[in-house]
Image (cartoon, rainbow, N blue to C red):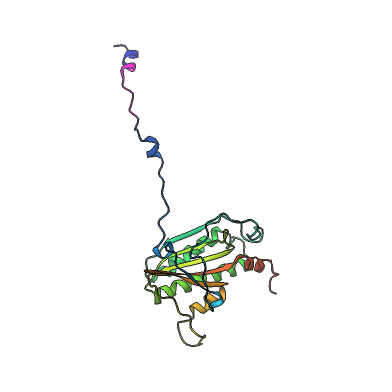
Amino acid sequence: MSQADFASARPEPEQPADLAAAAVSVVDDPPAHPAEAAHPDEAIVPDGTGSATAPATLPAETPDPAQAPDPAEVPAAASGHRRIDLPGTPSAVTIGRDFTRQALTDWGWTPAQPDPTRQTIAADILLVVSELLANAVMHAGGARAIAVDDGAATGAFRLEVVDGDPAPPVPPAEHRPGLPGGHGLLIVAKLTDRWGVISAADGKTVWAEVDLTRLAGDLAAPPTP
């Protein structure tokens, strides 16, 4: 048999029928925790006092340009909503804080060049995260998850901490200097514009928000001498 006849007689290699399917994989976002998937009333505590009701989940609609903060006034880095599950142990405080710090860096709140105002804003947000997580660890059996939202769709930077205790946190009536514990929610109320609770049968989500318009005002203010 000639070389040409031998080449033509060789069988063609079979192509897998599912080649296209094998080359592409789609990974869906993990399902939300039941405390976030439910739609109970959301208790709002503006400045740590009072109560009201509001939608229990973050809006998913397209942002309204007329209502969004001026993009020139806030960091213009990649935006979004991020969430991770936590181990429910004291290490959740460190994990959640590092997770939030990375989000702040990606969203432009911790620039490479020194910026005292942005550094202060980031430090305040990280302190709120630490207090919410520590409160879940100490009083709610541990934190199950944390979520952060940059506020591009809502006009407010939002933090959420999920735990397994349906009982809402109770802020102390007053600050008592010299006595340990019980001051976390006072700090949250002082550093945010509002905070509240989303209750569910198997746990709750404690959330806090900081308005981007206020942050933009802080960025525009002249530096303190």
Q: Position of residue 199 (x, y in %)?
A: 43, 70
Seen from the viewer's position, the closer of residues 172 and 135 is 172
Is 30 situated left or right of 185 in this image? left
Is residue 97 placed above or below 171 in the rendered structure?
above
- Residue 19: name its quadrant: top left
Q: Where residue 98 sits: x, y (%)?
A: 47, 64
Residue depicted at 54% across the width and 62% down the height: 104
Residue lying furthest left: 1
Examine the structure image and report whether residue 78 is included in the region drawn in magenta: no
Say whether residue 12 is magenta: yes
Question: Residue drawn at (53%, 60%), measured in percent from left and top?
Answer: 59
Q: Is residue 11 left or right of residue 53?
A: left
**Depth order, front residue of 100/163:** 163
Quadrant location, the N terminus: top left
Q: Give how far across and how far down residue 213 sits, in percent.
A: 64, 66
Q: Quadrant of residue 30?
A: bottom left
| Residue farthest along the top direction in this orientation | 2
For image coordinates 34% across by 16% down, the residue present is 8
Q: Tell me the quadrant of the picture where the C terminus can be found.
A: bottom right
- The number of numbered badges drawn on the structure is 0
Q: Main secondary structure of the magenta part?
A: loop
| Foreground residue among 5 and 194 | 194
Residue 86 in the image, given as x and y percentages of width and height: 40, 65
Extent of the magenta region: 7-14
